[in-house]
């Protein structure tokens, strides 16, 4: 796994130049960095390092409007330029697609929180039932949107024209895990910036790392030795009762800080555990009761709650847990790579980021997951022009892949918010290790089986994973079978 220590800035510059040239579109438009592209006389193949899509060059939908229903809080589109590289890339993405295939993209946001998820989903259901034309493409976090699939709210994307699911702007692992009998109703990928920033890694405080004279973490990753046992070893003895009250609390110092919920979930992928695994017929079945599952959950529960080396807070106080790291009172913290800018960008002490842990050294490669806030997209059955909507989806995904993704990942994250070249390289390893699993993605439509791991680990008391999972195994298995059967019985359209 020896990685080349190339200069992050140079790599970002090369990729970004190609991306911005690709989005210029000719005709004297202005690229996201504000430069005039009138003089560009090269073809897209000559000016970009990224794969082009296969949409016909003369595609023209004569100004047809396509409505995209968005989760407002994620800010996945922008209506005007403001000089920020990512904001402007989002703005130019929609403008370029509109000009390219002669459509009008109408972005329609709605507030979405976990407390209002049913209101959001009911809005999609109502729009489909009414056929009122207010939605063509619907999006939401993958924790909830799949619940609408069995009721027939989405078209089978695999059968639509223009959409090429083999292209790199679609997440292939997600497609492989969620296609049932050749049918695919939801996709994810470059259209959502969360598909990049939502992947989880481990941040480390460089000052504390040096103070405790610990091994070089980048070398551990490089050698394949960054495993859970190594982290347990490094965090031993880091706890300190800073405020002197004799009780472990958020004002003290810890080896590992973690908040319950989204920060716990990716360890399933990190340890190569599957909530579901495909059986010999190719259908997913529950596999949360294997010996490795039992060992992994029980080990993590003891590490978090009884070792004395860790501090945990629930999702509602994630900011307090992050503050422990920012205030130099945590050696490690698990967080999304997007936190390099949003949460830790102004941190005075240097930090680094490395992949999530492997289970053991026999495991090949480092893996992670994207948080449950990742966005999925579907084309609703009530769309008035499925052909046009499919073309818009393909164009937006492909344009995002060439412009938004490089702006976000190569510039905003790997250069602007990386404290060293090694950290920039770690971003690549984390991204390349993202895994998907049917049970993780569609879990909220399956008796919420994807929440069981984090719910158990968040609870200080525990009777052991084996007995815990035995209580839900039968209803969870029934829920999986019912979901699959409902999808198989959906009418083809």
Image (cartoon, helix red, strand yellow):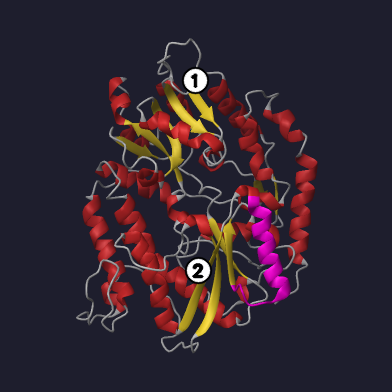
Density class for disc 2 (Cα within 10 Å; few <14, some 14-19, many ≥20) is few
Q: Give how far across and how far down residue 98 sits, in percent.
A: 43, 79
Residue 125 among magenta residues: yes
Q: Residue at x 73, y 72 (%)?
A: 129
Question: On the image, which quarter does residue 89 sit in?
Answer: bottom left
Q: Give how far across and how far down residue 461 sits, in percent.
A: 66, 23
Residue 336 visible in rendering: yes
Q: In the picture shown, does residue 323 fall above or below 146?
A: above
Density class for disc 1 (Cα within 10 Å; few <14, some 14-19, many ≥20) is some
- Indicate left or right for 229 with 25 as reference: right
Which residue is label 2 attached to?
166
Q: In the picture shown, does residue 425 fall above or below 34?
A: above
Which residue is label 1 attached to?
249
Residue 236 among magenta residues: no
Q: In the rendered picture of this protein, how many numbered marks are placed on residues?
A: 2
Query: 397 or 140: which is nearer to us?
Result: 140
Magenta segment range?
116-136
Query: 147 or 281: which is nearer to us?
Result: 147
Q: SS at mark 1?
A: loop
The quarter of the rendered structure image containing the C terminus is bottom right
Q: Are marks 1 and 2 in contact (CB under 8 Å)?
A: no
Q: In the picture shown, does residue 264 fall above or below 122?
A: above
Disc on the earlier residue, 1 or 2: 2
Q: Give how far across and how far down residue 87 sits, in percent.
A: 36, 62
- Indicate left or right for 47 with 377 as reference: left
Q: In the picture shown, does residue 8 fall above or below 268?
A: below
**Tag shown at residue 406:** none
Label 1 to label 2, Cα distance in Å? 49 Å
Q: Residue at x 47, y 49 (%)?
A: 198
Q: Residue furthest left?
A: 39
Q: SS at mark 2?
A: loop
Q: Give how far across and how far down residue 157 sits, in percent.
A: 60, 71
């Amino acid at each position: 796994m020896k990685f080349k220590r190339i200069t992050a800035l140079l790599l970002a510059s090369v990729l970004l130049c190609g991306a911005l040239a690709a989005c210029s579109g000719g005709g004297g438009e202005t690229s996201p960095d504000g430069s005039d592209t009138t003089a560009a006389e090269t073809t897209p193949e000559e000016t970009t390092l990224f794969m082009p899509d296969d949409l016909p060059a003369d595609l023209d939908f004569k100004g047809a409007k396509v409505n995209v229903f968005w989760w407002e809080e994620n800010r996945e589109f922008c209506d005007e330029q403001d000089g920020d590289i990512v904001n402007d890339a989002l703005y130019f993405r929609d403008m370029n697609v509109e000009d390219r295939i002669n459509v009008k993209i109408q972005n329609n946001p709605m507030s979405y929180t976990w407390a209002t998820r049913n209101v959001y989903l009911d809005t999609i259901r109502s729009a489909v039932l009414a056929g009122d034309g207010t939605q063509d493409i619907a999006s939401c976090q993958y924790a909830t949107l799949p619940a609408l699939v069995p009721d027939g709210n989405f078209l089978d994307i695999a059968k639509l024209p223009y959409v090429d699911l083999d292209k790199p702007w679609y997440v292939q692992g997600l497609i492989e895990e969620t296609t049932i009998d050749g049918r695919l109703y939801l996709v994810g990928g470059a259209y959502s910036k969360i598909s990049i920033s939502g992947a989880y890694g481990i941040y480390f405080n460089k000052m504390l790392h040096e103070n405790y004279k610990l091994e070089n973490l980048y070398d551990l990753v490089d050698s394949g030795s960054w495993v859970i046992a190594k982290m347990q070893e490094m965090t031993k003895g880091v706890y300190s009762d800073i405020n002197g009250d004799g009780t472990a609390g958020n004002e003290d110092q810890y080896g590992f800080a973690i908040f319950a919920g989204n920060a716990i979930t990716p360890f399933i992928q990190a340890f190569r555990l599957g909530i579901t695994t495909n059986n010999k017929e190719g259908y997913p079945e529950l596999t949360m009761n294997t010996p490795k599952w039992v060992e992994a959950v029980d080990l993590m529960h003891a590490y978090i709650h009884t070792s004395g080396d860790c501090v945990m807070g629930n999702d509602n106080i994630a900011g307090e847990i992050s503050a422990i790291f920012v205030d130099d009172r945590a050696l490690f913290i698990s967080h999304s790579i997007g936190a390099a800018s949003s949460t830790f960008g102004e941190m005075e002490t240097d930090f680094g980021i490395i992949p999530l842990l492997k289970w053991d050294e026999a495991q090949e490669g480092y893996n992670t997951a994207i948080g449950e806030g990742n966005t999925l997209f579907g084309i609703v059955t009530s769309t008035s022009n499925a052909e046009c909507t499919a073309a818009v989806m393909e164009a937006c995904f492909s344009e995002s892949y060439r412009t938004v993704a490089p702006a976000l990942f190569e510039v905003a994250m790997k250069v602007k918010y990386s404290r060293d070249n090694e950290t920039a390289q770690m971003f690549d390893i984390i991204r390349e290790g993202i895994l998907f699993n049917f049970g993780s993605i569609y879990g909220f439509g399956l008796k919420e089986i994807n929440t069981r791991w984090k719910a158990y680990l968040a609870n200080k008391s525990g009777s052991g994973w084996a007995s815990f999972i035995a209580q839900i195994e039968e209803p969870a298995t029934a829920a999986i079978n019912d979901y699959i059967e409902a999808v198989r019985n959906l009418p083809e359209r």
